[in-house]
């Protein structure tokens, strides 16, 4: 079983390969955020991104995997910009490939 990996340049390349207006996920949703969709298309069909700190793939008992710092920063920035406000951030409207790429490219 391969370990899910998150490579910033590969994720950016995936976003760039899509039509800019394509829906790539929803902020604030562990099963449908852009990173989860990226991982699913990369062979991890049940991947989830939880609590901004850990990546979990449920494939055949696969466990928890650390999320790199850039990915945590991306999730936080995407949620702050697009998730519905509230005491606890809620799932926001879908974001496009162009919106997700702009957030990613705005990170240090």
Image (cartoon, rainbow, N blue to C red):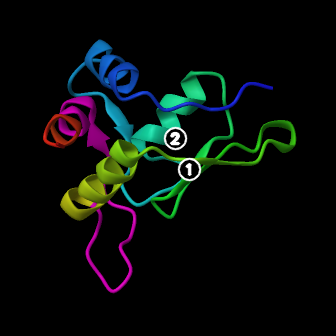
Q: Residues within 10 Å of mark 2 (few under 14, many from 20)?
A: many
For the record, the magenta segment spans: 83-101
Q: Which residue is mark 1?
A: 31
Residue farthest toward the bottom in the current orientation of the protein: 87
| Residue 93, image quadrant | bottom left
**Count the marks: how many?**
2
| Residue 11, image quadrant | top left
Q: Of helix, strand and loop, which one carries label 1? A: loop
Left or right of 27? Residue 36 is right
Left or right of 101? Residue 69 is right
Marks 1 and 2, Cα distance to the nearest angstrom?
6 Å
Residue at image location 56% in from the left, 30% down from the top: 5
**What x and y, as percent, mark residue 69?**
38, 48
Q: Which residue is mark 2?
A: 36
Quarter placement of the C terminus: top left
Residue at image location 44% in from the left, 47% down from the top: 33
Quarter placement of the N terminus: top right
Residue at image location 38% in from the left, 52% down from the top: 72
Residue at image location 32% in from the left, 60% down from the top: 92
**What x and y, as percent, mark residue 84?**
28, 69
Query: Foreground: 107 or 14?
Result: 107
Q: Is residue 94 magenta?
A: yes
């Amino acid at each position: 079983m391969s370990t899910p990996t998150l490579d910033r340049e590969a994720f950016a390349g995936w976003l760039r390969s899509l039509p800019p207006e394509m829906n790539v996920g929803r902020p604030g949703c562990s099963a449908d955020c852009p990173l989860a969709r990226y991982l699913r298309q990369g062979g991890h069909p049940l991947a989830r991104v939880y609590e901004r700190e850990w990546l979990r793939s449920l494939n055949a008992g696969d466990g928890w995997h650390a999320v790199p710092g850039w990915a945590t920063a991306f999730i936080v920035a995407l949620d702050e910009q697009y998730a519905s406000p509230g005491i606890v951030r809620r799932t926001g409207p879908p974001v496009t490939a162009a919106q997700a790429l702009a957030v990613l490219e705005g990170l240090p």
